Image (cartoon, rainbow, N blue to C red):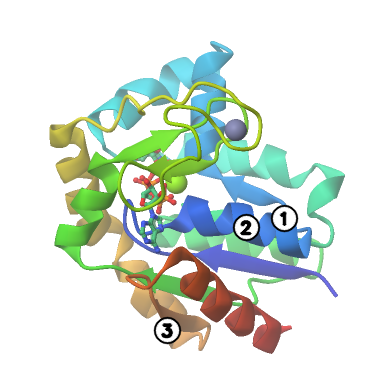
C-alpha cells in the first residue's frame, strides 16, 4: 500500500535531515519543494527565475508556481509507492490541491508528523547549518558536524551555506512560517492526521519517533 507522509515543522526543525533518513530506510522518495527550487536555480530554468526573488527574501513562492512544480514531480513513477513531502504543503490552498492530486490515483495523505522545535532553537539550528550541493544532506557546526570539516561524509563534496540563510531572511522565514503555514496544523489536526513529535531531541531519537508514527499509520 502506498503511503504519503507530510513532514511539518518550522525552518530548521529538521524536516530535511529526517526526510533523508526516512528516504534511505523506507525507500520512499523525499519531495522537498525547497530543494526543487534550488535545483531550478542551479539549472537556471524559467521556474527558477520566477521563484528566486521570493526564496531569497524568505517569502512563500506563489501557490501556482509551487503547485505546477509538485504536479510535475508526482508524475514520476518513483512516487507510486508513496512519498515524503518536506516543506510542502505550506498553505491551505496547497494542502487542498495536494489532496486533489493524490485523489486522482485513489490515494491520500496518510500521516502528518509535526516536528516541534521552539523558535529560539530554530534560529540556532539555521545559523550553523551547512548543506551538501551534491546530495542535499545537511550538517551543523555544533549539533551535527561532518567527520571532516567542510566536507560531506557521503560524497566528499565541499559544503556550502544556503543563500537564504542570512540572519534577516532566517527571521523572515520563521515569521512567514508562523503566519502562513502554522494554520495548516489545525487543518491536519481536524482530519485526525497530525502527530506531534518532540524535535528538540537528538536526530536519532526524532527519527525513532517518526518511524513509529509512520509505521502506525500504515
Ligand atoms: P525550505 O528549503 O523548505 O526551507 P525551510 O522550510 O525554511 O526549512 P529548512 O530547510 O530551513 O529547515 P529543515 O526543517 O529542513 O531543517 P534541517 O533538516 O535543514 O524552503 C526554502 C524557501 O523555498 C522558502 O522560504 C520559500 O521561499 C520556498 N518554498 C519552499 N517550499 C515552498 C512551498 N511549499 N510553498 C511556497 N514556497 C516554498 O535542519 C536544520 C539544522 O539543524 C541543520 O544544520 C541540522 O544539521 C540541524 N539539526 C536537525 N535536526 C537536529 C536535531 N534533532 N538536533 C540537533 N541539530 C539538528
Ligand atoms: Mg529543509
Ligand atoms: Zn553529499
Question: Can residue 88 be seen from the camera position used here?
Answer: no
Q: Residues within 10 Å of mark 1 (few under 14, many from 20)?
A: few
Question: Circle 3 is placed at which residue position?
Answer: 189
Instruction: Describe the element under mark 2 as helix, strand or loop.
Output: helix
- Residue located 47% across and 42% down the image: 138
Query: Could you give the CA–CA distance between mark 2 and mark 3, rounded to whole angstroms?
Result: 25 Å
Q: Residue at x 41, y 26 (%)?
A: 51
Where 202 sits versus 216, above or below?
above
The quadrant of the rendering that contains the C terminus is bottom right
Q: Is residue 194 left or right of residue 68?
A: left
Q: Which residue is mark 1?
A: 24
Q: Earlier in the sequence, mark 1 or mark 3?
A: 1
In this picture, residue 53 sits left or right of residue 137: left
Q: Which mark is residue 57?
A: none
The residue furthest front is 148
Q: Nearer the viewer, residue 35 or 103?
A: 35
How far apart are the alpha carbons under marks 2 and 1?
5 Å
Q: Quadrant of ligand 3?
A: top right
Indicate yes or no: mark 3 CB to ligand 1 under 8 Å: no
**Mark 2 and mark 1 residues within 8 Å of each other at the beta carbon:** yes
Label 3 element class: helix
Residue in view at x 49 percent, y 18 percent: 41
Amino acid at each position: 500500500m502506498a503511503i504519503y507522509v507530510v513532514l511539518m515543522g518550522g525552518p530548521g526543525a529538521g524536516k530535511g535531515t529526517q526526510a533523508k533518513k526516512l528516504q534511505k530506510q523506507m525507500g520512499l522518495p523525499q519531495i522537498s519543494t525547497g530543494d526543487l527550487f534550488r535545483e531550478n536555480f542551479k539549472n537556471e530554468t524559467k521556474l527558477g527565475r520566477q521563484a528566486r526573488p521570493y526564496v531569497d527574501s524568505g517569502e512563500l513562492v506563489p501557490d501556482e508556481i509551487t503547485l505546477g512544480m509538485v504536479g510535475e514531480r508526482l508524475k514520476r513513477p518513483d512516487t507510486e509507492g508513496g512519498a515524503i513531502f518536506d516543506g510542502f504543503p505550506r498553505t491551505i490552498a496547497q494542502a487542498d490541491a495536494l489532496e486533489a492530486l493524490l485523489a486522482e490515483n485513489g490515494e491520500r495523505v496518510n500521516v502528518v508528523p509535526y516536528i516541534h522545535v521552539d523558535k529560539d532553537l530554530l534560529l540556532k539550528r539555521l545559523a550553523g547549518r551547512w548543506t551538501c550541493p551534491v546530495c542535499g544532506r545537511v550538517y551543523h557546526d555544533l549539533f551535527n558536524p561532518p567527520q571532516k570539516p567542510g566536507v560531506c561524509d557521503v560524497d566528499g563534496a565541499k559544503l556550502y551555506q544556503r543563500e537564504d540563510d542570512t540572519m534577516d531572511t532566517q527571521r523572515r522565514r520563521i515569521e512567514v512560517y508562523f503566519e502562513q503555514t502554522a494554520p495548516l496544523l489545525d487543518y491536519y489536526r481536524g482530519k485526525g492526521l497530525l502527530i506531534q513529535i518532540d524535535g528538540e531531541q537528538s536526530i536519532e531519537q526524532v527519527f525513532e519517533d517518526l518511524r513509529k508514527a509512520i509505521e502506525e499509520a500504515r
